[in-house]
Amino acid sequence: MDKVLGEKLHKRYLQLGKSFLRLSEPDAVELANVVFETRSVLEGFTMFCIGPTAHSAELNSALLRRWLLVVPRFLTIAPFLAKKPIDPAPVKSLGEELLCHIEAEATVVGRNYWHMSERTAQEFGNCIRRSASVCFAFHQKCLAPDKFTLKEHAALLNAFANEALCHALGAHKLMVEGTMSNHG
């Protein structure tokens, strides 16, 4: 994502925080900063999602690790969304075939790179699968911040925080547990 687009994204989410969600100035700035600062990681995760078999397992492992390590940072914005009732946006699925590939490749990463048991790796793959469509849709809105209304951004951000991040947090916990048990 280029610098100009990043600045537009920050400005749009600052506006979303201030005028639509009616957050305090510091909270609106924090919302905009979280989206702005983590955009490249989200982009890497969506790269994994649209081509999970196009990359080496090593690259997939790096993309997933990088994504999962910022999930806790993204979760800091969830309380901001609770301040105003917002219906989550409906999100079109990436499609069953692609979601199966995402789950399979994430399972391979969990098993082969993070040394999870087969069962835990499958649970990990399922968590990644369940977060993929919403993450992809949110990233697409981030690429065109001016083409959507504040209400549309808020609705998708709500779906992202309450659906995608819940599953990503599950995957994050499995990754951390797997990493800790192999180094502890």
Image (cartoon, rainbow, N blue to C red):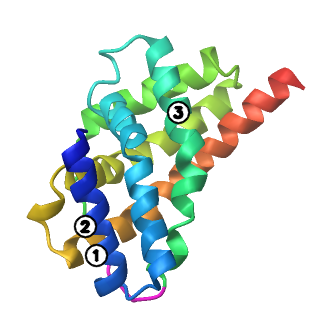
Check disc 1 and report its element: helix, strand or loop. Answer: helix
Q: Which residues are magenta?
A: 83-90
Q: Amino acid at mark 1?
A: Gln
In terms of secondary structure, where does tag 3 sit? helix
Q: Pointer 3 and pointer 2: residues touching (CB < 8 Å)? A: no
User: Horizontally, is 2 left or right of 10 in the view?
Assistant: left
Task: State the residue at coordinates (38%, 42%).
Answer: 42
- How many residues crowd mark 1 within 10 Å: few (<14), some (14–19), many (20+)? some
Magenta region's main secondary structure? Answer: loop
Q: Is residue 119 above or below residue 57?
A: below
Tally of numbered tags: 3
User: Residue reaching furthest right?
Assistant: 184
In this rendering, would 162 be left or right of 11? right
- Give how far across and how far down residue 1 sits, in percent: 25, 39
First along the sequence among labels 3 and 2: 2
Q: Position of residue 58 (x, y in %)?
A: 50, 12
Q: Residue 15 bears which disc, if any?
A: 1
